[in-house]
Amino acid sequence: MNKSLFMRIVHRLSTEVEYFQPTQDAVGRSSLSLLQKCTAEIRQLAYGGGADTVDEYVRLGETTARKCLHHFTVGIIHLFGDEYLRCPTPEDLECLLHIGQQRGFPGMVGSIDCTMNDLNILDRSPVFDDIINGIAPQVNFYINGTEYHFAYYLTDDIYPKWVTFIQSIRLPYGPKKSLFAKT
């Protein structure tokens, strides 16, 4: 995560979420710093670690890390949910499709391999609700003379065989297939 994005998150949490505002304990010592709390929670989320994985790195106990994570996620959803946790607009979709086209993948809206999605709850993820319900973004594109009507995500072989999940080639042979498998 780049520093300006991190600091934007830190600033918004510190000014708008009470839990992240500086406090003092009964002796008058400052509580954990905002940077400690935010660093711990972003590390937990980014690396998929448990609450006990940040104790030595940012000196945050397991119980406190769990409490911070709860307040952090609630705060992020409250502050940034309307902007970032929504379905893509037609303009967003057009931009994503353009990026996919530029990279040689017409009709691709994203790559979800190695993104730490929990496959056990994939069918309950709001990100994939439309796909599961058969209302994936409709687009028209051609590959090798064949017309397709649904946008797709590039995945690895652990994902289900859904029409909108295109899996990489496991054992590529030849330059074309090797290029496809590099993504």
Image: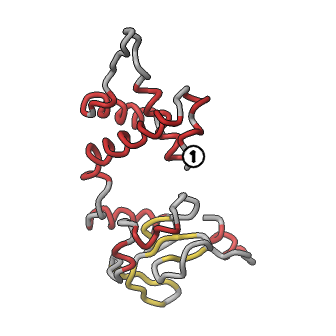
**Residue at image x 58%, y 75%?**
167
- The image shows residue 105, relative to residue 150, as above or below, that is above
Residue 128, x across and y down, in percent: 39, 70
User: Quarter of the image holding residue 127?
Assistant: bottom left
User: 116 or 8: which is nearer to us?
Assistant: 116
Q: Residue furthest top?
A: 27
Number of dots carrying numbers: 1
Question: Considering the numbered disc 1 on the image, is that residue within a helix, a strand or a loop?
Answer: loop
| Residue 9 image point, x, y percent | 36, 36
* Amino acid type for the residue under numbered disc 1: Gly
Instruction: Return the residue found at the far bottom.
Output: 146
Residue in view at x 31 percent, y 48 percent = 77
Query: Where does the image place residue 181, in percent across and percent down from the top left?
Result: 65, 70
Asked where in the image residue 134 lies, by quadrant, the reply is: bottom left
Front one among 16 and 165: 16
Q: Is residue 82 left or right of residue 51?
A: left
Left or right of residue 179, residue 96 in this image? left
Q: Is residue 121 left or right of residue 127?
A: right
Residue 37 in view of the camera: yes
Residue for point 42% across, 68% down: 109
Establish if 2 lies above or below 158: above
Mark 1 surroundings: few (<14), some (14-19) or many (≥20) residues within 10 A: few
Query: Does residue 97 appear in the picture of this structure?
Result: no
Above or below: residue 102 compared with residue 167: above
**Which quadrant: the C terminus?**
bottom right
Q: Residue at x 31, y 41 (%)?
A: 75
Which residue is tagged 1?
Answer: 49
